[in-house]
Structure formats: structure tokens, C-alpha cells
Image (cartoon, rainbow, N blue to C red):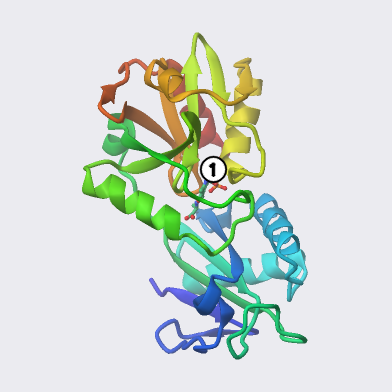
Amino acid sequence: MPEIAFYKDKFVDINDTVVPIQDRAHQFGDGIYEVIRAYNGKPFYLEAHLERLGNSAEAIQIALPYTLDEIADICHEAIARSTILEAEIYIQISRGTYSRQHHFPEATPPVFTLTVKEARFISSEKRTEGFRVLTTEDDRWKNCYIKSLNLLPNVLAKQKAKEHGYDEAVYHENGTVKEGSTSNIFAVKNGLLYTYPPLKGILHGITRKIVITLAGELDIQTKEEPFSLDFLYEADEVFVTSTSLEIMTVKQVDDRLLPTERPITAQLQAHFRQLK
Ligand code: PDD
């Protein structure tokens, strides 16, 4: 299946594309991105992702080079050209290309990049078995609601988790659980669902929002409030959510094994599957 790339205003060969050295995405991570899943060739919650892209752009004062409708059209065309049905779309917008200087260059157009590739496959065995997550102090900036290209702390946290035999790193701030390095996190206790509130310190995940809506439909109450690491260790169920992980069971937090009965997670997973 061909991987597809769109650079500036046209579709290009993914192997030929050379991004200029002076692109500010290289130099400063000065840009934003989105990751969108397509199921059976249809982008999932595209509008919500593009709305968040627009919000991220506005937050760092990048003027989108296309309207959201035009970006949606590019996504659809890219999927069609790729012929990949189970796809992952990556969109990146950098502030532009200019001789290196910290402040914004004047009158430099932003650079729009899009790729489509096969989505990562997660086996149903892995989904049932669940993730091990390793908690780590949140050493990121205070504006993680912006989906910015500056992912070095996330990369380092994920690598640390991997080196210790874990699947995901989970950030806490002085013992308050926030989110994963590439996911949001939920805990279930006594039939209630808990997740960190949508403040500036976490990414407002699209999957997180879908889960809260599904929970409401299932009469499961969600408390968007901070909770502690101890609360996480003692939870009845824990799961992480993201575009690529969907709703992923967590079986272990640090060295604590969680209960193997996960009725609420299973219910939410079943309802999520029906949305695809
Ligand atoms: N990551 N929190 C962080 C820090 C993330 O990077 C992500 C997504 C999420 C979940 O957001 P959503 O449900 O909208 O995917 C939460 C994407 C998939 C990535 O960087 O690849």
C-alpha cells in the first residue's frame, strides 16, 4: 500500500520529499500537528481533530494555510490515493522556512505537511492483556493543550518506560495524575470514572471526549477532577485512550497489578467499537 505525502500545495512522493533545512519545525519544533485515524477509509472524528488543529494554530499565532474544509478535502483525497483502509493521517504545520532567528519571521507562509500510512495494529490479545504503565514526574511545559511539535519530554518518557519494560509513561505532577506521554488516562473507582480535567496542562484528547460521552450514554458518571497516584494504584480499573490506542486496558501501574475484572472498560470498549 503506498504511503502518501502532501507537502505545501501538492501530493508528492514520500521518498523524494526533502524539507528545507531552514524549516522552523526542524530548528525550533515551531509548529503543531494532528493524528487522525481512518477506519475502512473514513477519517474518524475528522471535524473534532481539525477544530483542535485550528485551536492549536491560533494558540501559537500560526495562520492556517487552508480552511478546515480544504484540509478535510486533502485528508479525503490522501486516503483515496493511498488506498489504505486502516490508516493513520499525520498533519503538521510549521511556522515556515526562514534563516534561523527566534522571533517570528515576517511574511513567511506556514508549511503544511500531511502523510498517510498504515495504522498501527494492536492485537485483540494485547487489548485484553492490557498495558503496563510507568509513572513519571511531568517535566513538560504548562501548555500541553496545544498539540505542539515539541515532544522531547514525551519521547524521553516513552523511552524510559520502554527501557523498563512498560508500554506507556504516565505523567504526574507532585503526585497528581495527569495523562500519558501519548494518551489520556482514566481510573474507575466504585462505578465512577475519573480523569484529569481539561485544563491547559494536558492534551484535550478526542478519544477522551468520546469516552466521556459514551460513559454518559451508559449512565456511568465521569468526574473530571484531579486524583492522586495512590488513587490510581488502588483503582478498580484503569485505561488509557488515544487515537491510535483507542481504549486500552491497563493491567499494571508501576509495580502494582490491577484487578483483572474490568467490566466498565469492557463496556466502553464495546460501545466504542460500534462507532467505528
Ligand atoms: N497522541 N495526550 C497526549 C500527550 C497525546 O500525545 C495524545 C495523542 C493524547 C490523546 O489524544 P487523542 O485522543 O486526541 O489522540 C493525549 C497522538 C496519537 C500522537 O501523538 O501520536
Whether residue 267 is visible: no
Note whether 50 is above or below 22 in the view shown: above
Write the residue at 37% across / 42% down.
Answer: 169
* Closer to the camera in the image, 7 or 152: 152
Residue 244: x, y in percent? 45, 49
> Which quarter of the rendered picture does the N terminus lie within?
bottom left
- Work out whether 43 lies above or below 194: below
Place of residue 36 in the rendered image (x, y in percent of width and height, measured from the top left): 55, 56
Is residue 9 visible in the rendered image? The answer is: yes
Total count of labels: 1
* Amino acid bearing label 1: Lys
Name the spot of residue 230 as percent of width and height, x first.
Answer: 41, 19
Place of residue 262 in the rendered image (x, y in percent of width and height, measured from the top left): 39, 18
Corner quadrant of residue 28: bottom right
Q: What residue sits right under mark 1 in the picture?
A: 276
* 201 left or right of 242 in image: right
At x 64%, y 32%, the residue is 197
